[in-house]
Image (tube, rainbow, N blue to C red):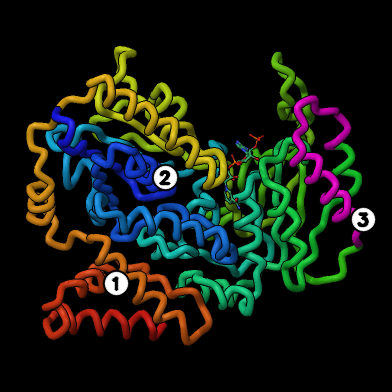
Amino acid sequence: MTNSSPTRIVVIGSGPAGFYAAGHLLADSSGLIEVDMFERLPTPWGLVRSGVAPDHPKIKSVTRVYEKTAEHPRFRYFGNIELGSDVSRAELAERYHAIVYATGSLTDRPLGIPGEDLPGSWAATDFVGWYNAHPEYRDLEFDLSGERAVVIGNGNVALDVARMLMLSHSELSKTDTANHALDVLEHSSIREVVVVGRRGPAQAAFTNPELRELRDLEDVDVVVDPDELERALAVDDPNMSKTAERNVSTLREYAERPPTKDRRVVLRFLLSPVELHGDEQGVREVVLVRNELTADESGALRARATGEQEILPAQLVMRAIGYRGVPLPEVPFDEHRCVIPNERGRVIGQDGSHRPGEYVVGWIKRGPTGIIGTNKKDAQETVDAILEDLAADRLAEPSMPDPEDLERMLRERKPNLVTYAGWSQIDRHERTLGEPHGRPRVKLANIEEMLVIAASEHPDAGESADGDAADTAAQSTAAR
Ligand code: NAP
């Protein structure tokens, strides 16, 4: 490699981890790194768009940082391109010095209990994708005609789901909740959401601002049984964090308040679901077993079933027990941890050695933990490894490095490839639809509609069939 030839790097996935990696790479002082990013959806931002709850707009404003990266002259975005089906890993290896996998954790973890597949039993990730207008989840049909929902898990996703089920229409209608979800949630009959943790409040994974904001829900009590709370706190946790201390004091406040409203979020502890009862009509009951806390050899407190059971009638069950990574074609995968095996971001092959030129960032690197900002540091570690390998001449020269060739190949395979300009069209379109209603945007949930709007980036699209289709798409979205 000569000193002035560019280093070409492709990032697969456009969520926070992918964008932090791209940003760090472009900030390299050589000024010679070029980054292409592939995304299987037309739209970027990963879970910032399709995971963060609609009532958390401030968290979403992090995309301004990613927009700066996307506008960098040495960056290109190719949406609607999927690794494996549209382009293979081997083809990328011929065209780039390095590949960075940033595909996150695409699916949910199952509970593995009888009745889990009954109608009305869902992965929280389905509900989250649905209310956030992720195109793959938009056709799901949530029946909210029952009075009680049970959410399994004590993480932030469990609290997001509980809140989304309890937010009033007037609260939700100011957000970018998918139109299809707004309609269903407006007619929800759910009066009570029971959030069930298998361990105690000192071991809960949720963070304190999320726990505290439950009390801001309009006309909703937060109910904690004082006896159950103290029982769950009876065993001292040597690993109790500052967050857990704050959570305990918030929960004690909740436990002191007498309920006065007819809708509530109930926080329960030391309970695990062991079976869901119901029939083809749907879930009717959740069978819970009471747990006790016991220390394992490391001192960490684990839940152990006591055998004492409780039956909770419920018509909707959401398991919010974590996300799970899925394998990518031709890329090593650790089936146990559901991540791409790696050492400080360098992908490790089956023989235990580094796969030259392959790297990983974010949840598919370390598992589904941490907040958005966690990915910044995580991506820096991987980028440091890439730069180290580059300096040590460990990255092979690609045989077909021409960036224009790559774009031509992608356009031949996917004529409706979405560039950053195409995404900007979708972005403007969504914001324009939201404006008259005081909403940040009205999200498109249909890939065909997105592609039509994105295609209007082409100057000749205005008067063409595409232009007409764009009008039709706009009308059909606004009409909902
Ligand atoms: P999480 O934080 O890992 O929480 C998973 C919860 O599920 C834990 O309480 C865990 O309990 C429980 N669980 C696991 N297996 C279980 C089982 N078989 N039965 C019963 N309970 C089980 O996962 P998450 O809520 O999906 O969140 C993923 C990440 O995204 C987290 O880092 C989270 O903070 C982040 N996030 C942040 C926000 C925000 O900042 N507002 C919003 C959403 C998500 P144990 O502890 O006992 O294993």
Q: Which residues are magenta?
A: 232-257
Q: Give coordinates of residue 83: x percent, y percent.
A: 23, 43
Amino acid at circle 1: Gln
Of pointers 1 and 2, the one earlier in the residue sequence: 2
- The amino acid type found where label 3 is placed reads Glu
Magenta stretch contains residue 337: no
Q: Residues within 10 Å of mark 2 (few under 14, many from 20)?
A: many
The label number, if any, that marks residue 425 in the structure image? 1
Residue 292 in view in this figure:
yes
Q: What secondary structure is marked by label 2? A: helix
Q: Main secondary structure of the magenta part?
A: helix
Taking the image as shown, residue 153 lies to the left or right of residue 125, namely right
Q: Is residue 252 magenta?
A: yes
Viewer-nearest residue: 410 or 222: 410
Relative to residue 466, is residue 137 drawn left or right?
A: right
Callout 3: CB less than 8 Å from ligand 1: no
